[in-house]
Image (spheres, rainbow, N blue to C red):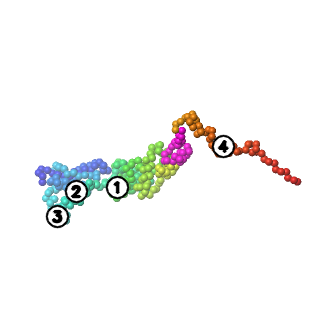
Amino acid sequence: MEKGKIYGVWAVRSGASIFGHAAAWCKEDGRPLEFDTEKMAQDYAAEMNRKTTANVHYYAQEKEPEPGAVRKTAAQAQQQLDARAPSQAAPRNEAAEKLNEIPGRQLVAEPDQMVEIRSAVHSNYAGMVAMLGADNRVYLGREERYHFEGDQPAYYDDSDGSLCFVTDRADMYYFLYGEGWAHTQEEMLGRGLVADQYAEFARLQHGVLRQFEVKRELRFAGQPFQEPEDYLHNAELYEEGQTGNYNMLDGRLDNEPPERPDLTDGQTWEEIRELAPETLPGAAGEKPSLMELLKGERPEHGERGHVPPSPERER
């Protein structure tokens, strides 16, 4: 026993837990737990940290002795060690442990089974509730596992592992429930939504959301949600068709008509007439067009309207 010193294990629950922040000395049968040496307290804290969740941690600290405390002495620890089976008391082989060690390995804390929820609503997927967690992540889970009582923070009991992480984009929460919007997808781009949200929702539909049964479709102006490539193509057919730009279907709306190439190399009409008059319309020696040739062969109006008399029949 370290002279004049008593050690305990201080348990701390973080504010991230749905039950809030808390801290206290560890107890056994309702009585404070005390250790003769710091090493014993550290071993106890390490064992508890291996069993707990990410929101709770144990620390070995010096403390004041308390009446009625459960005292753990070095002699008791040795008795427990002697009582173990030979296989349990096998000495550590530090060389073998070093050989089997994986460089860079980290122990991942077990996830908390109680997940705090900020907002929840019945989703468009059968038997599932859409949830926005306190961590601003979007989840889907079974309706019976979601709990809300009075003024207490709502939480999801994930002890059965049924909580499904959807995305870390909080704006996707609004795409998982309700009937949709009264405007078209194109109109909603000017009313608060952005094209990137359509692309993300389409990605989720082809990914994590495929495992759920859809009970209600998300609609825009009564039409089912279309992936960005589909609705942009249809909108572009209409918009570009108004200006005759069917050769500009490139995924962008409101393209300008294509500019005609400048074959004059910046020369004015007068300069061309002086340097190359034969290239101008109506220039001497220009080959007549087919329409002009046909007009030249067309008969005059009077001749075109003349009908020869039919021979008189003998009676």
- Disc 1 marks which amino acid? Asp
Residue 20, image x, y percentages: 30, 49
Magenta-colored segment: predominant secondary structure: loop
Secondary element at tag 1:
strand
Quadrant location of residue 281?
Answer: top right
Whether the residues at callouts 3 and 4 have beta carbons within 8 Å, the answer is no
Q: Which residue is depicted at the point 56% across and 45% down?
A: 244
Q: Which residue is depicted at the point 35% across and 58% down?
A: 161
Q: Is residue 145 left or right of residue 61?
A: right
- Disc 2 marks which amino acid? Glu
Q: Is residue 245 magenta?
A: yes
Q: Which mark is residue 157?
A: 1
Q: Nearer the viewer, mark 3 or mark 4?
A: 4
Which stretch is magenta?
Answer: 237-264
What is the C-alpha distance between the residues marked 3 and 4?
118 Å
Any part of residue 105 in sight: yes
Q: Nearer the viewer, mark 1 or mark 4?
A: 4
Whether the residues at callouts 1 and 3 have beta carbons within 8 Å, the answer is no
What is the C-alpha distance between the residues marked 1 and 4?
87 Å
Whether the residues at callouts 2 and 4 have beta carbons within 8 Å, the answer is no
Name the residue carrying label 4. Answer: 292
Task: Compare marks 1 and 3 and give the one earlier in the sequence.
Answer: 3
Q: Is residue 108 magenta?
A: no
Q: Which residue is depicted at the point 25% across and 55% down?
A: 103
